[in-house]
């Protein structure tokens, strides 16, 4: 899916799909899966929408249940990106190319890859519509469509990325601009933002700030940098234990945090960022910047808004304990596109995939899924904030010009 529009499920931890042997991404489709096509059949026992972390994980699980040739993944993008690596790409420690694999190489053997985009869902008739008015029917549907990046909701974006000194680790088109802006920084305000919407991998906006600070400290620019974290939230982190630890780091590294500040406009030609003070609706402040990292507003994919499977906000409406849809018993959701009360990360998806696998197994046996929250399941999402500790202790030694 478009890297600046709808994107796959975010991951702060490594999704299982990337635990591939070196070189596997270079293999052809032979022996991996049925080659991509518009649609080999018009019916599948299990149809998965989305080829991100959740979609690929569940397609592999479902193939083991119903057999090869009976599962299909609908995914329009020919490239699958391991997006957690983009924090390190933006921080100068990795190359963008290392985050890419062909979608062909990550779709499990025996699973059909339908290279198309979903345009409508009709759960009452057990079918979905794809581009070119192609209809695909199913017995079971798994929705894993990820989350949509909405740069356009900030006035002046995305066209503002044509200017220097501004980047964003959330898009394949702008992540390398982050590293360039960090390198070219001389002195002044370095601003990092957090939007007033749900965010995938909510730690990422702070991670790049800490990496930037470490680089400027290493290169002797720290004393000339006024590092600012302008967040729409009222706290630095939602869990007090970790918030307290982060506040100590922020104090130690002389970072300024402005709470309840939401980015509403970027005047890239003037290097100005306009923030609304959420404590004073309608009141804005203009901050000059020498470097700006934008975390965009995010929301459900367009195809889910006003869809029969979605709640009033556009998220797939699933039972929080089983991941089964609240109305349609043969429809399930996983990952960022759902209204689950969890973080939107691959860590969450990893836990959800096991729960969903159990749920579908019971449904396939005409049994009711057990509504029991396993403390080691959906809601036990480990926080592994590796970037809190000194960066030099966490990254491999490499080119001295990199972090």
Image (cartoon, helix red, strand yellow):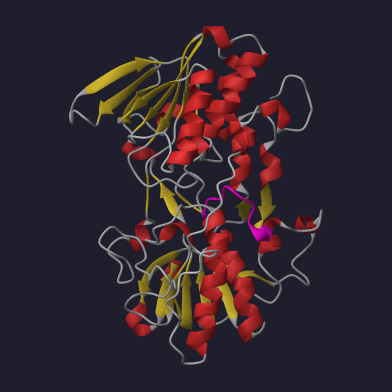
Chain part drawn in magenta? 8-17
Please tell me which residue is depicted at 56% across the width and 27% down the height of the picture. 210
Residue 320 lies in what quarter of the image?
A: bottom left
View extreme (bottom): residue: 366
Q: Quadrant of residue 58?
A: bottom right
Tell me if residue 61 is in the magenta stretch.
no
The image shows residue 400, relative to residue 7, as above or below, that is above
- Magenta span: chief secondary structure: loop
Along the line of sight, the residue nearer the viewer: 49 or 386:
386
For residue 115, say whether it is visible. no
Residue found at x 35% / y 61%: 315
Q: Image point 43% across, 53% down: which residue?
A: 147
Residue 295 in view (yes/no): yes
Q: Is residue 308 above or below residue 238?
A: below
Q: Foreground: 306 or 225?
A: 225
**Image quadrant for the C terminus?**
top right
Give the image location of residue 368, x and y in percent: 43, 87
- In front of the other: 353 or 331: 353
């Amino acid at each position: 899916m478009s890297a600046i529009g709808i994107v796959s499920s975010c991951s702060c931890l490594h999704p299982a799909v990337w635990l591939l042997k070196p070189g596997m991404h270079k293999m052809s489709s032979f022996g991996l899966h049925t080659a991509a096509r518009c649609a080999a059949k018009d019916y599948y026992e299990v149809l998965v929408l989305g080829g991100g972390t959740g979609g690929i994980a569940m397609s592999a699980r479902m193939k083991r249940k119903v057999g090869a040739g009976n599962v299909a993944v609908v995914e329009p993008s020919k490239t699958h990106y391991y997006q957690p690596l983009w924090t390190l790409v933006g921080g100068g420690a990795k190359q963008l190319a290392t985050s890419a694999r062909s979608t062909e190489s990550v779709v499990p053997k025996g699973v059909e890859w339908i290279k198309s985009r979903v345009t409508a869902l009709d759960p009452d008739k057990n079918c979905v519509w794809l581009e070119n008015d192609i209809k695909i029917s199913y017995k079971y549907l798994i929705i894993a469509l990820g989350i949509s990046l909405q740069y356009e909701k900030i006035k002046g974006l995305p066209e503002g990325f044509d200017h220097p000194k501004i980047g964003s680790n959330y898009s394949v088109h702008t992540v390398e601009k982050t590293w360039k802006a960090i390198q070219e920084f001389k002195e002044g305000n370095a601003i990092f933002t957090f939007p007033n919407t749900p965010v995938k991998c909510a730690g990422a906006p702070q991670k790049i700030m800490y990496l930037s600070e470490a680089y400027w400290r290493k290169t002797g620019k720290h004393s000339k940098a006024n590092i600012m974290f302008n967040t729409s939230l009222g706290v630095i982190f939602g869990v007090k234990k970790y918030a307290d630890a982060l506040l100590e780091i922020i104090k130690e590294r002389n970072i300024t945090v402005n709470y309840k500040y939401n980015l509403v406009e970027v005047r890239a030609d003037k290097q100005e960022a306009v923030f609304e003070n959420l404590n004073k609706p309608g009141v804005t402040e203009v901050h000059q910047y020498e470097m700006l990292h934008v975390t965009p507003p995010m929301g459900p994919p367009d195809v889910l808004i006003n869809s029969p499977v979605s709640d009033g906000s556009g998220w797939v409406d699933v039972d929080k304990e089983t991941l089964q849809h609240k109305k349609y018993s043969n429809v399930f959701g996983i990952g960022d596109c759902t209204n689950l009360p969890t973080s939107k990360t691959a860590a969450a998806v990893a836990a959800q995939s096991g729960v969903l696998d159990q749920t579908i197994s019971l449904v396939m046996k005409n049994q009711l899924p057990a509504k029991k929250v396993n403390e080691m399941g959906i809601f036990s999402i480990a926080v592994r904030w590796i970037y809190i500790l000194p960066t030099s202790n966490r990254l491999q030694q490499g080119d001295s010009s990199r972090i």
